[in-house]
Amino acid sequence: MDPEQEQIKQFAAGSRAAFEALVIRYRQPAVGFARQYVHDYHISEDLVQDCFAYLYVYPGKYDFRSSFKTYLFTLVRHKCLDYLRKKGRRKECGGPAEDVLIRERSDPAEEPEQRFLAGEGWSEWERRLDGLKDDYRTAVYLVDVEGLTPREAAAVQGKSSAGFRVTLHRARRQLKEFMEKEEDDPYGRRTFAQWKSGGKESVNR
């Protein structure tokens, strides 16, 4: 069995060590996704912390029908939408899960995603993403930044696979139009996936 899958299996069986490892691996990607909804880093951290607290208390809720990342991002999306509906009311999480989340901080320099988010090509691209409407922005973010398949991203968004692909196609087309207006921007035509691979991937894949 793949080491990560074994770790996820141990988490679902109630292993705290496996839970801590998953927090380290997925915390920052989850916060980045939450920011696409609430546009505030600290609030995003709080919401993601709530999601991990839920996972800590109910590890058996994960049923392996989707990838762990898809499951986590689905929780994050629902938490963000709930936050937006309640206009800022947040559930307070405490206990062991919170201790883990406060203590475990990944070094942004360790992951290429975090170097990108920290400013190596991200700021201009994020500005363009912010010009998209919400469902377009999150579609591009899930697939081109976080590397989910369109099918996984559709599950996170609660859409059919066909419907999501239409949204993604339209979002990429609009984003490309933004990019083509900024010829002098060295990152203007690059998605995160392209940045990570040295520019080998196409925007219209």
Image (tube, grey):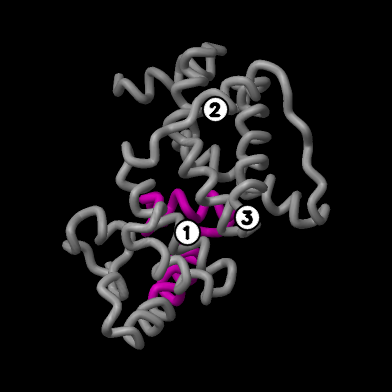
Q: Secondary structure at mark 3?
A: loop
Q: Around disc 2, counting alpha carbons within 10 Å, would you say few (fewer than 14), some (14 to 19), or many (20 or more)?
A: few
Q: Which mark is residue 161?
A: 1
Q: Position of residue 31 (x, y in %)?
A: 54, 45
Q: Position of residue 50 (x, y in %)?
A: 68, 34
Q: CA distance from mark 1 to mark 3?
A: 29 Å
Answer yes or no: is residue 204 visible: no
Q: Position of residue 4 (x, y in %)?
A: 36, 25
Q: Is 97 contained in the magenta span? A: no
Kind of residue indicated by mark 1:
Ser
Q: Quadrant of the N terminus?
A: top left
Which SS type dominates the magenta stretch? Answer: helix
Q: Around disc 3, counting alpha carbons within 10 Å, would you say few (fewer than 14), some (14 to 19), or many (20 or more)?
A: few
Residue in the image at 50% along x and 50% along y: 32
Dots 1 and 2: beta carbons under 8 Å? no
Q: Position of residue 103 (x, y in %)?
A: 54, 23
Disc 1 or 2, which lies upstream in sequence?
2
Kind of residue indicated by mark 3:
Asp
Q: Which mark is residue 63?
A: 2
77 shown above or below 122: above
The boundaries of the magenta stretch are 144-172
**Residue 184 appears left or right of 65:** left
Query: How many dots with numbers?
Result: 3
Dots 1 and 3: beta carbons under 8 Å? no
Residue in the image at 38% along x and 84% along y: 177
Residue in the image at 44% along x and 63% along y: 140
Kind of residue indicated by mark 2:
Asp
Residue beneath disc 3: 40
